[in-house]
Amino acid sequence: MSTTSDRAIDPLDYIGFDALLSDDERAIRDAVREVVREQILPEVGDWFDKGILPREVFREFGKLGFLGAHLEGYGCSGVNAVAYGLINHELEYGDSGLRSAVSVQGSLAMYAIYRWGSEEQKQSWLPRMAAGDAIGCFGLTEADAGSDPGSMRTFAKRDGDDWIINGSKMWITNGSTADVAVVWAATDDGIRGFLVEKGMPGFTAPDIHKKMSLRASVTSELVFQDVRVPDANRLPEATSLRGPLSCLNEARYGIVWGVVGAARACYEEALSYSQERIVFAKPLSSYQLTQQKLAEMVLEINRGMLMALHLGRLKDADALRPEHVSLGKMGNARGALEVARSARSILGGNGITLEYPVIRHMNNLESVVTYEGTHEVHTLVVGGAVTGIQAFR
């Protein structure tokens, strides 16, 4: 009779992670994995090269229930936090830009309406966004107000039954393709959220070009020049920075899972390449330095997955704190970037071409380390939690 110790280690599931998931969670993960491998991977290198993400991707993902999957009702799938994390993981195995587009749609734009909007706003937008028929973006970051959103200059002034918005937002995923922008602006009574619809006079969304990262998604600036927005488009329940920050926490949770997907894609490519590449009459994988790199990758990926799973279980138990998410985002994003860089070195010159996914993931992860809260800011959040002293306030 064979025992567990007699079985060979699976290099693609080193610690038996699959056994920690429920049948439903595995089924959802496998469904997303199949779509990514069959429909996304053959195309995403070209999308990255051309700097595009076809709108049809949103409609396809809407049919499959990926958009706003963690939300209840309004055409959303209502999956648990772990399943939603696994969706992000598999999407980012395909590409960080792809996961970013879906994350902005569901965890930022849709969640903002779901959590802070009126029932009329929810009924109007969420079913269409869940189906991929309407695309959303999230306007918080400004050129001079990234890590410090309270310093935003975009201002909304009350004018009878309307609001007049002036200002701009920067680095906005889905910006020019969005049918609705969730825009956060300062007012005389604090930070408020508004639904700015495509085509409103004075609202433009020029794309940001010449970027070397997250190219398989659209990144734009949002510009507001005396944009008149009816009060019915104001998110009635959002009255402070707590509104946008709650949305960011949702998106950061998805990143904790997603970046490990990018790391896993790099590791799998490096492992396969090292076994096939012959150097000095031996496979590259037979050299000690290569094995050290692969072992470190396995460590980072499995450590990251366990962190993500634990945070997911906490979220499902309604016990997840923003400080927990900061720890996960800080550690997993940094670890994923280290894996990508190490994988790139194993592939040598082939590591810098889009014939292989590694340089694409590596470039993408350089952005992911920075966005949704920089590595430095999350470090200070964790430092503040353990010392009781806020270093940046």
Image (cartoon, helix red, strand yellow):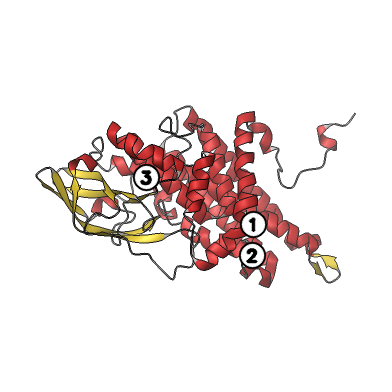
Residue 84 at what x, y percent from top left? 52, 38
Query: What residue occupies the far left of the structure in this picture?
Result: 160
Q: Nearer the viewer, residue 377 or 183?
A: 183
- Picture quadrant of residue 126: top left
Q: Is residue 202 above or below residue 321?
A: below
Q: Is residue 312 above or below residue 334?
A: above
- Please state if 388 lies on the left or on the right of 229 as rendered: right
Residue 146 at what x, y percent from top left? 33, 56
Which comes before the other along the chain, label 2 or label 3?
A: 3
Q: SS class of the residue under badge 3? A: helix
Q: Which mark is residue 344?
A: 2
Q: Are marks 2 and 3 in contact (CB under 8 Å)?
A: no
The residue tagged 1 is 266
Q: Amino acid at mark 3?
A: Ala
Q: Are marks 1 and 2 in contact (CB under 8 Å)?
A: yes
Q: Nearer the viewer, residue 149 or 74?
A: 74
- Picture quadrant of residue 210: bottom left
Q: SS class of the residue under badge 1? A: helix
Which comes before the other along the chain, label 3 or label 1?
A: 3
- Between marks 2 and 3 in the image, the one whose residue lies nearer the viewer: 3
Q: Which mark is residue 109?
A: 3
- Picture quadrant of residue 351: bottom right
Number of other residues with Cα within 10 Å of mark 3, as a class: few under 14, some 14 to 19, many 20 or more? many
Q: Nearer the viewer, residue 202 or 240?
A: 202
Q: Amino acid at mark 1?
A: Cys
